[in-house]
Image: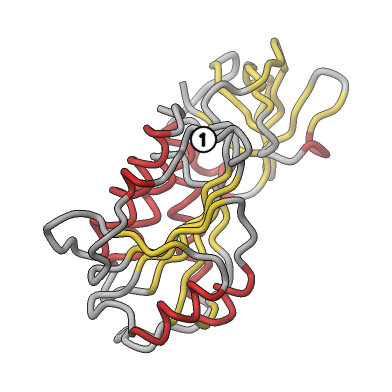
Amino acid sequence: MARFYINKEQISEGKAIIQGKDVNHIKNVLRMKVQDSLELCDNENTLYNGRIAGFHPNFIEVFIDTVSENQTEPDIKLTVLQCIPKGDKMSTIIQKCVELGVSEIIPVLSHRCVSRPENKKVIRWNAVSEEAAKQCKRGIIPRVTDIMSFQEAVDAADADLKIICYELENERTLHDIDFSNEKIKTVAVIVGPEGGLEEKEVEYACNKQFFPVSLGKRILRTETAAPTVAGIIMYCMKQI
């Protein structure tokens, strides 16, 4: 069943109003009809099952049949601080991270980032996040923040557990972290760009309570690293 996201203000007296770009998608792409069923989510983890009541020039009216808590959201908040890669790899990273349950993605400009896009790129990245959220039936649309410098992103990271993936770390791996600790409700992970992180960047993050970890004996591409570490964390914290 197709899922769409609305604000709570669009729901009143057993009805919901769908506005914006979803109107065209429902009418002309999905070709849905009156009485067709769909799912609505208020981006606060509440799920509304409804039926199309009528089409109007700029909105669609929906009858709400049932209201329930969405069951697909993890109990933890995982934030990925992703150093911006070349090309369109960022879109792939965002898509996969959203599917795996990541709550927020922070695009980071580290010293070795080759691609240095402007903030207008964030509009596209948030659209990718929304499409991925619809596909995998998330209860929220994970936010892609404005682009930050490495220092800004590290300083902004507020989490119970902070991890930085570092290919030169040779002592600690993800196996060494106690993910069973019930006090851990928020996790932040830094993933470097294609050329890796500079030593001084890792030192700065460590001074801000980030733990450096190795992801194994093989060097992963940056577009592989973020979904890999997100999947491992979700599994270890029993969120998959």
28 shown above or below 170:
above
Left/right placement of residue 127 relative to residue 115 reads right
Question: In this rendering, does residue 222 appear at all?
Answer: yes
The residue identified by callout 1 is 27
Q: Is residue 144 left or right of residue 216?
A: right
The quarter in which the C terminus is drawn is top left
Near-viewer residue (75 or 208): 208
* Amino acid type at mark 1: Lys
Residue projecting furthest to the top: 65
Spot the residue most to the right: 13
Task: Please provide percent x and percent y for residue 82.
Answer: 41, 66
Q: Residue furthest left?
A: 218
Snapshot quadrant of residue 195:
bottom left
In the rendered view, tell whether residue 195 sits above or below residue 124: below
Residue 96 lies left or right of residue 45; in this view the side is left
Q: Residue at x 46, y 38 (%)?
A: 179
Q: Nearer the viewer, residue 167 or 194?
A: 167
The answer to which quarter of the image holds residue 13 is top right
Q: Residues within 10 Å of mark 1 (few under 14, many from 20)?
A: few
Residue 18: quadrant of the picture: top right
Residue 197 rendering spot, x and y as whole percentages = 32, 79
Tag 1 secondary structure: helix
Give above or below for 143 relative to 185.
below
The foreground one among 7 and 206 is 206
List x then y, in percent, for residue 75.
58, 32
Q: Residue at x 53, y 32 (%)?
A: 74
Seen in the picture, residue 39 relative to 141 is either above or below; the reply is above
* Residue that appears at 28% across and 48% down: 228
Q: Is residue 56 visible?
A: no
- Residue displayed at 51% across by 58% down: 162
